[in-house]
Image (cartoon, rainbow, N blue to C red):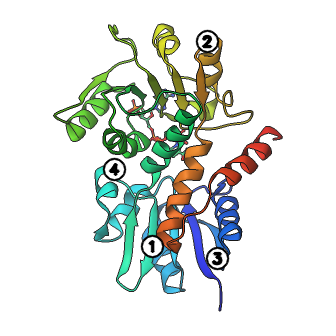
Amino acid sequence: MSAARYAVIGNPVAHSKSPAIHEAFARETAQNLSYERICAPIESFVASVDAFFEAGGAGLNVTLPFKLAALRYTQNVSERAVRAGAANTLRRDADGVFADNTDGVGLVRDLARLAGAGAPPLRAARVLIAGAGGASRGIIGPLLDAGVARIAIVNRTRATAQALVLQFQNPSVELSAHEYGAAWGESFDIILHATPASLFDARVPLHDDLISEAKLVYDLAYGRGTASDSTEILRHARALGVAHTCDGLGMLVEQAAESFFLWRNIRPQSAPVLAALRAAQAHV
Ligand code: NAP
């Protein structure tokens, strides 16, 4: 039987780790599949996806800048993708194309792994999110489902954070929107950094006292080095004495594992794949 065909579609996609992750999952679970990169022209997402599925493709991971377009590609959409306002996974089956979003569950699973190693659990945690873009929108619903006690969103443009507060308002969890320069009369257990600043070796201007009082600083981005110091905000948090710091490589692997499950109905083990990526990351 010919291999089922999967791909990551984005622009750019040359540096995507998704092929390595899914090929490792396929080896581990003995699934006969191929996984490629598709760099779609910015204006031709729909035509590129149509062509992939018409040629027999079975599923796609969708990355920047197409996650909103992926949600609009089909009427058959999961509740969590609707809540996130974006889709990162498409699956074609007998009923047509189904769109889902696995980013939030990927983060929650990686945070559970860290809690197993002594970091604060999400249940009853006071969480500060820096950034109000696509990633933040994807994680707030799953954080609420995981039982957090409080979410504050701090963003360069406060109005964008406020829009998320309104979208996700919840009777049992206080959500609020802030600017970086705001006066803070409270502290947080977990800080989640969800802006692209790390990709430019920069960090957002969060107060040092907020950072130093956190028990976990987690950056959704990742870079060179070890899990705990591969981005600027993680290095800064460590210098301020934060006990637990971690980058988003584990989230990447966990969201991929959830996509793989959606496509193949088999759940791969993420730990060995994360360990292999970590080893490779330490040597770049
Ligand atoms: P995005 O939609 O482009 O994020 C935009 C947000 O970041 C906005 O809130 C924007 O503020 C803020 N921002 C942008 N540049 C900034 C800067 N220099 N200083 C302060 N704030 C800045 O990106 P995203 O999709 O949310 O992704 C955010 C990060 O999460 C990226 O590093 C991405 O790689 C990472 N991510 C990781 C995973 C994973 O699996 N590990 C998954 C998804 C995303 P304004 O509103 O003021 O413009």
Q: Residues within 10 Å of mark 3 (few under 14, many from 20)?
A: some
Residue at screen point 30% across, 28% down: 149
Residue named by callout 2: 241
Mark positioned earlier in the residue sequence (4 or 1): 4
Mark positioned earlier in the residue sequence (2 or 1): 1
Residue named by callout 4: 84
Residue named by callout 1: 91
> Where residue 252 sits in the image (x, y, percent)?
57, 49
Mark positioned earlier in the residue sequence (2 or 3): 3
Query: What is the three-letter code of the residue carrying label 2?
Result: Gly
Q: How far apart are marks 4 and 1 (CA)?
A: 18 Å
Residue at screen point 58% across, 40% down: 248
Q: Is 160 left or right of 251, judged from the image as shown?
A: left
Q: Quadrant of the N terminus?
A: bottom right
Query: What is the three-letter code of the residue carrying label 1?
Result: Arg
Q: In this view, does 96 lie above or below 137?
A: below
